Amino acid sequence: QVQLVESGGGLVQAGGSLRLSCAASGRTFSSSAMGWFRQAPGKERQFVGYIARLGDNTYYADAVKGRFTISRDNAKNTVWLQMNRLNPEDTAVYYCAVKSGRSWPPTRTSEYDYWGQGTQVTVSI
């Protein structure tokens, strides 16, 4: 069993930044690749980014590439999502998840088997 807890969401003006955290427990964190997803009201959950278990490989959705950065510290069992130059289209609930599947690119929700409860990010004009 794995527990994931996201934090760091909030209200920010367009052009601003937020840093989300995902704290993991209950499993060897360093053995797991991780992903970030988001879901806006009335829309499907959408892939945001991925980080390999050792942090040596990342992959981002086109919509966030160059603005968002994923990092991790296996000693702290934590993954971060640094979000810069936010715009209203980034408004959503953001989730972290453990990737168990081996497909590539790592964009499908079905490849992830443990999810956090999500943290709300709201970007105002």
Image (tube, rainbow, N blue to C red):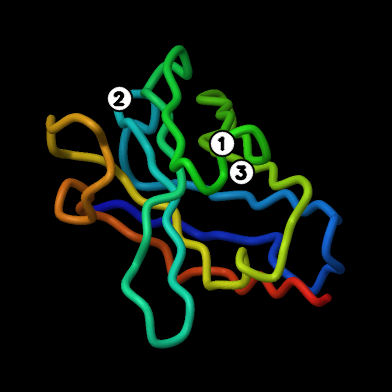
- Crowdedness near tag 1: few (<14), some (14–19) or many (≥20) residues, C-alpha within 10 Å: few
Q: Is residue 77 left or right of residue 125?
A: left
**Residue type indicated by callout 1:** Lys
Residue nearer the viewer, 75 or 83: 83
Q: Which residue is mark 3?
A: 81
Q: Which residue is mark 1?
A: 65
Find the residue positioned furthest to the top: 56
Q: Earlier in the sequence, mark 3 or mark 1?
A: 1
- Residue 52, image quadrant: top left
Q: Which residue is mark 2?
A: 31
Q: Which callout, 1 or 2, points to the residue nearer the camera?
A: 1
**Residue type indicated by callout 3:** Leu
CB contact under 8 Å: marks 3 and 1: no
When the figure is inspected, residue 8 is found, relative to residue 34, above or below; the finding is below
CB contact under 8 Å: marks 3 and 2: no
Label placed on residue 97: none
Q: CA distance from mark 1 to mark 2?
A: 25 Å
Q: Residue at x 63, y 40 (%)?
A: 68
When the figure is inspected, residue 117 is found, relative to residue 103, above or below; the finding is below
In the rendering, at what x and y percent does residue 43 appear?
A: 37, 78
**Residue type indicated by callout 2:** Ser
- Residue 46, image quadrant: bottom left
In the rendering, at what x and y percent does residue 115 appear?
A: 34, 60
Q: Earlier in the sequence, mark 3 or mark 2?
A: 2
In the rendering, at what x and y percent does residue 113 appear?
A: 20, 53
